[in-house]
Image (tube, coloured by chain):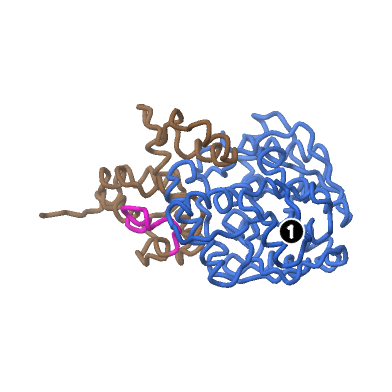
Amino acid sequence: MKFEISGKTVHNELAQTVEAISGQNLFACYQCGNCTAGCPVSFAMDLGPHQVIRHVLLGLDSEVLSSNTFWICASCLQCTSRCPKGLDIARIMDALRTIVLRKKERLDHIGTADLTDEIIDRTPQIAFISGFRKFLS
Amino acid sequence: MDYLYFPGCTLYTKAKNLDTAARECAKLVGLELRELPNWTCCGATFPLATDNLMALLPPSRILANAMKEGENLTTLCSVCFNVLRRTLHLLETDAEKREKIFDFIEMEYSDGFHLRHYLEILRDEIGFDTVGEHVKRDLKGLKVAPFYGCMLLRPFEEMRFDDKENPRIFEDFLRSIGSEPVDFPYKIECCGSFQSVGAPDVATECGYSILTSAMRNGAEAVVTTCPLCQFNLDTKQKEMKEKYLDFSGIPVLYFSQLMGLSFDLPRETLDFARNDVDPLPLLEKKGVIDGGTDR
């Protein structure tokens, strides 16, 4: 399968939007994998954070936007803390979440109707407030 | 020492056991806590999208309110602390955003405002030695694993709470009240945070890794400072036991409960009945308390 990469590929619209929202320079990533290694939830991700960055730069929009990576991300900032190039990877993950949630069609990631009384009773409010911020349009 | 106190959504409700003990201990060590009048929710997450100013309004309003009422503000909840400290940093360094925000909320910004976490006050202003002087009950060298979680420490450039890879403040605190801190590699890992709502099974794994690491390193109990960490590590042991049948569980307490215990506060103040894994059997076994039940 022939895959052409040009300057235009890597400066694609998704990459530019991610850079604008996150304020990060995706080209700084040199794929060392520190982020994915330190991420406490990467075991559940189909693409590691560093792979997501590469996918975005290669214009692989549909693969990235259908991955579970930025939905599993807990915004713990371990990736940001460990990145040797000083990239705030947590912001990059949040930018991708934001891009999906800001689309015209309502694309809530969790169903609030699925929250039973039992869940609501036992869970501290913090989880709902921050969770709704991260998962709801 | 006078501080305005911001409780946040859980401290008077689901995390009462963090709040009550901390306030009673504060009185004893000379820390005056005055509840911030008309406080509102902090938003529970610092907005990472750089164009999201709306999410900065709740914490900005809290800070503006506190600036009106005094010069110092403290909080106990790690999440609130992270949001407020990061917001304050942004307001201090980004004049354009500061102006937009304060113009919108129609409040005044003041320079020279201090925001400190309760543990920072203990370390830097009261001193752990002074804390130690108030210890009346022997904790018999109880082996306690301090769980920092993520919000207190990261990002280091803004939080400046302690070393981001090998912090020591919690260990120093635990030593000062007569317990033996247990170092373990998962002490700065994330507990799963809001994934307890988004991807609960993932959060269960996070909690399980943390607790088993603490146990492998000899911990008899784990101590937290965040209501969400407490939920993911204490309450969710139910899910961990369902998944890992050989998981024996471990008591998880708020640091203020342990502090209050060492200060010999009345048992009702410590509110152990709110801890889902009952710490009393352990405390009785170690000879720290005489027995009885809180539930």
Q: Is residue B175 left or right of residue B182?
A: right
Looking at this view, is B272 or A32 the one in front? B272
Q: Position of residue B32 (x, y in %)?
A: 87, 48
Compared to residue A20, the image places residue A26 above or below, namely below
Q: Which residue is mark 1?
A: B258
Looking at this view, is B214 or A126 the one in front? B214
Q: How many marks?
A: 1
Q: Secondary structure at mark 1?
A: helix
Q: Position of residue B28 (x, y in %)?
A: 88, 55
What stretch of residues is rendered in magenta?
Answer: A38-51
Q: Residue at x 35, y 27 (%)?
A: A105
Q: Is residue B32 left or right of residue B109?
A: right
- Which amino acid type is shown beneath numbered disc 1? Leu
The tint chain B carries is: blue
Q: Residue B45's quadrant in the figure?
A: top right
Give me the chain that's brown: A
Q: Residue at x 83, y 46 (%)?
A: B33
Q: Position of residue B130 (x, y in %)?
A: 86, 65
Q: Residue at x 74, y 65 (%)?
A: B173
Can residue A137 be seen at all in this image of the molecule?
no
Q: Residues within 10 Å of mark 1 (few under 14, many from 20)?
A: many
- Chain of residue at mark 1: B
